[in-house]
Every structure is written in C-alpha cells, then in structure tokens.
Amino acid sequence: MTATDFDLEMQADPDEIVMIPATAERKPDHYPVDVASKVFWAQTSEEREKTFEVLRREQPVSWQRPVDDAVTPDPDDPGFWAVVKHSDIVKVSRDNDTFISGQGVLFDLLPPIFLELTQSFLAMDNPKHDRLRKLVASAFTPKQVKLIEEKIRTAAREIVDGFASEPSGEIEFVERCAEQLPTRIFCDIMGVPEHLRLSTARNAADIVAWADPETLAGRLADEVQIEAATNLHDIAAELIEAKRAEPANDLITALINAEVDGQALDDFEIGAFFVLMAVAGTDTTKHTSSLTVRAMTHFPEQRQWLMEDFDGRINNAIEEFIRFASPVMTFRRTAVAETEIGGQTIIPGDKVVLLYPSGCMDSEVFDEPHKFDLSRENARDHVGFGGGGVHFCLGNQLAKSMLRALFRELLTRIPEFEAGEPELLGTNFMRGVKRMPFRFVPEK
Ligand code: HEM
C-alpha cells in the first residue's frame, strides 16, 4: 500500500483504524548501540543517558531491533526508529499528519484489548482526537487550574502536616507524600469518593509497571495489565451509576452529559477516559516529585538558591524539575507517509519511538545538561510534556500547580531534608520511583 492509498482510506472513514503493516524493506542493519534490550532499560537513567549521548552524536535516528520480551511478541515486527535529539522529537511530535498515534503509542507490543481499555484519545488521530480531547480540555486550562489552586495548596499543606513533625524525622516518601497530592486532586476533579481513591491510584500505578518484576510477582505482564485496567473500568462504572443517580460538579458527570456529534459517550468510552486520565494524572507527577527531591539532595545549592526567592523562582524551577526528571520516557508514533528525519528515510508503517529523557539532555539545546540548574533560562524548552502537537500533555498546568504547592510546603517547613537511594520501577515507559527513604529535621 502506498502512502496515497492509505490517505484515501483515511478520508473514506476518518474514525476507522486501518492497520498499516510494518516492513523491514529499505532498512539499514539494526544499529549496534541498542535501546531495545531489557538490559538497557534495567540501567539507571544516568547509565542510559550515556547511550543516548552516543546516539545523539553518532546516529540521532537509529534503526533498532524489536523490543526485548515484548508483552505480546510479534514475529513479523521488524524493529523501530529511535529518535533521540530534541529537534527531531519536536519535529515528529508536531507533524501529526505524517506520524499518527491511532496505531498505538506505546513502545512495547501490548495486547489490543489492553489498548482499547486504557488509551482513549491518547491513541487517536484527528478529527476524533480533537473531538474527544475537547470534552475534558476545559477542566485543565490555566484559568480553570487557577480556580482550584487554593484547594491544591490546602491539600499539599495537609499532606505535609501528616509527617512534618514526626519525631523520627524519617518516612518512605512515595507512599506518605509523592502519591498523595496527585491522587487527591485527580479524584476530586473526577468525583471519586474516598473509599475508591486508594484502589484508583494503585491500579493506575500497576498499569504502567508492566515490566517490573516486583509488580508482576510471577504473573504475566498482560494478566496484570488487563486486571488493573478492568479494575479501573469497574471503578468508573460505579462512578457513572452514582453520578447518573446524583449528578455533581465533576468530570464524570460532565462526561455523562457530553455529546460528540450529537451522540452521548457510552460507558466504555467514559471508562477508557477515566483510565487514561488516572494514569496520566497521578503517576507522572508522583514520580516527578520523588525524582526532584532526590535531585535537590544531590544539588543542595540549588535548593538554597530557590529558597532565597521562592515565589519569584519557582515557576522556572518547575520547568527544570520536569526537564531533569522527565518521567515519561517513551511514546511512539507510526508513519503514514514517506518522509525523512535525521537523514533517514521513514516509510509508511514504520514505528518511530520518541525518547523524551534524551531530548531533555540534548546539549545542542541545553548548556551543561547534566546539571540540575533551577535558573536555566531555557528550561521551559524541555520535551518532558511532549514535543508539541495535538497530543501535548493536557495536564501540564495542573502538574505544575501541584509541584508548586508541594515544594512550597516541603521547602518552607522542613527545608533540611535528604532523599536516600530510590528503588526504581523496571520499565521502558515510566521513570518511576517505587520507594525512597526521606529524612528531615522535624518541624517544631
Ligand atoms: C509531571 C507530570 C506530567 C508529565 C511529565 C506528563 C507527560 C506527558 C507526555 C509526555 C504526554 C504525551 C505527549 C505527546 O504525545 O506529545 C502526555 C499526555 C497527556 N497527559 Fe500528561 N504528563 C504529566 C501530568 C499530567 C497530568 C497531571 C494530567 C491530568 C490528568 C495529564 C494528562 C495527560 C493527557 C490526558 C494526555 C494525552 C493528551 C492527548 O493525547 O491529547 N498529564 N503527558
């Protein structure tokens, strides 16, 4: 099938997904510097960055062998293009006509049922993507986030109240702090009642941990994923029933009442929305907080600098938190037309994987990229929320507001803290911290 044939099919029915086969045609040998292996993803981010640095210099767009131990291996999978430079990540992200998401956005090969259960508009293309994104976008505008800023600050204060004066001066940071604020705010926005909040957060966390041996505990990855996704759909079903009986001022009620082209969403579509938002809205900010506390331990002078003028400096500092931590490590696109990036010819059907942490460390854009520098003038140019285009992170304002509130509390109330060695999640998608010791001088 040529690109033109494909375009015509797309025009015939824009909502129908036409799978384009990937092909090994016109490909170089698999590049010897490898980002597909399990060993590569089991490394620390500092070790992985050494490989990205080599690729940025030698082969910014490299043809890679298929990912190791895919959840649903495909013997015909020829491999993928790895895109590691900032400028190329931006180019691919913004060209949503050539590089589409409707054929899957995850780097691993996952079961189709899992994708249907979890991805919603993240894995859709226009016009359908925009129609669905618009339904929830109004809840995440800067103006809307400003309206709930006080609520976010109160929640952050109460969370830090929960441990700041603990005499031992030591907690496990992820459970006692990092996961609390995003879970609480996401659940408030969605209208999730108290008794379902913990299971919402835990199932959302399991979904992104599919390659982590501890999470799997001997079970198969697809079993764990589908179970977690089904649990979240069950929670969504309970919410839908409750909100139909008693509408409230929350996003689930808004989705029940929403129409796309004159048609209401069905319960499954609302469920998939819920799963996407639960994963996107909780785990990402949680890991950014943990990784930032760790970075502040390594770069104490940066913490000091921020504290000299917290209000004046925090917004730029947050951009550097995201650049440095870059918790979402990969998303993928599929090419539907022939094009060129980084001197390589990309043809329809090719999978193209965007490696965001590498883009965030690109020395052509960021001076001394390995330095955590909260005064970095162009920190906001990071690609931690994506490289732009129609899928750019919908929750970026909310994430920044939560980080601002949490670090205000931590830095003003227990400024003398240090993070111990984090236990990292073993996956190629989320740069996650499972547990991390946190020691501090308690508040009097
Ligand atoms: C530090 C925190 C966060 C980071 C690093 C992050 C990162 C990302 C990235 C890399 C993407 C994909 C961009 C692309 O494909 O071009 C994305 C998409 C998305 N994010 Fe975030 N995110 C964060 C927080 C949030 C929060 C709090 C929410 C709120 C619910 C959220 C909701 C979404 C949604 C719904 C999408 C899909 C957008 C679309 O396909 O149109 N994110 N995010």
Image: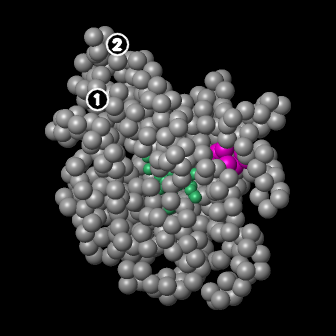
Residue 414 visible somewhere in the drawing: yes
Depth check, front residue: 97 or 71: 97
- At x 25%, y 29%, the residue is 418
Residue 328 in the image, given as x and y percentages of width and height:
45, 52
Name the residue furthest left. 301
| Secondary structure type for disc 2 | loop
Instruction: Return the residue at label 1.
Output: 411
Per the rendering, the mark at residue 166 is 2
Q: In the image, what residue occupies the spot 46% across and 43% down?
A: 399
- At x 65%, y 63%, the residue is 129
Q: Please tell me how crowded label 2 is: few (under 14), some (14-19), or many (20+) other residues with Cα within 10 Å.
A: some
* Secondary structure of the residue carrying numbered label 1: helix
Quarter of the N terminus within the rendering: bottom right
Question: Is label 1's Cβ within 8 Å of ligand 1?
Answer: no
Q: Is residue 111 magenta?
A: no
Q: Is residue 416 above or below residue 308?
A: above
Q: Does residue 273 belong to the magenta stretch?
A: yes
Q: Which mark is residue 429?
A: none
Indicate the amino acid at tag 1: Leu
The answer to whether 195 appears left or right of 436 in the picture is right
Residue 223 visible in the current orientation? no
Residue 205 image-quadrant placement: top right
Q: Is residue 106 left or right of residue 37?
A: right
Compared with 29, 217 (above or below) is above
Between the residue at mark 2 and the residue at mark 1, the CA separation in whole angstroms equals: 16 Å
Q: Quadrant of the C terminus?
A: top left
Q: Residue at x 51, y 74 (%)?
A: 95
Mark positioned earlier in the residue sequence (2 or 1): 2
Magenta stretch bounds:
270-276
Q: Amino acid at mark 2?
A: Glu
Q: Colour scheme used in the picture?
A: one colour
Q: Nearer the viewer, residue 309 or 158?
A: 309
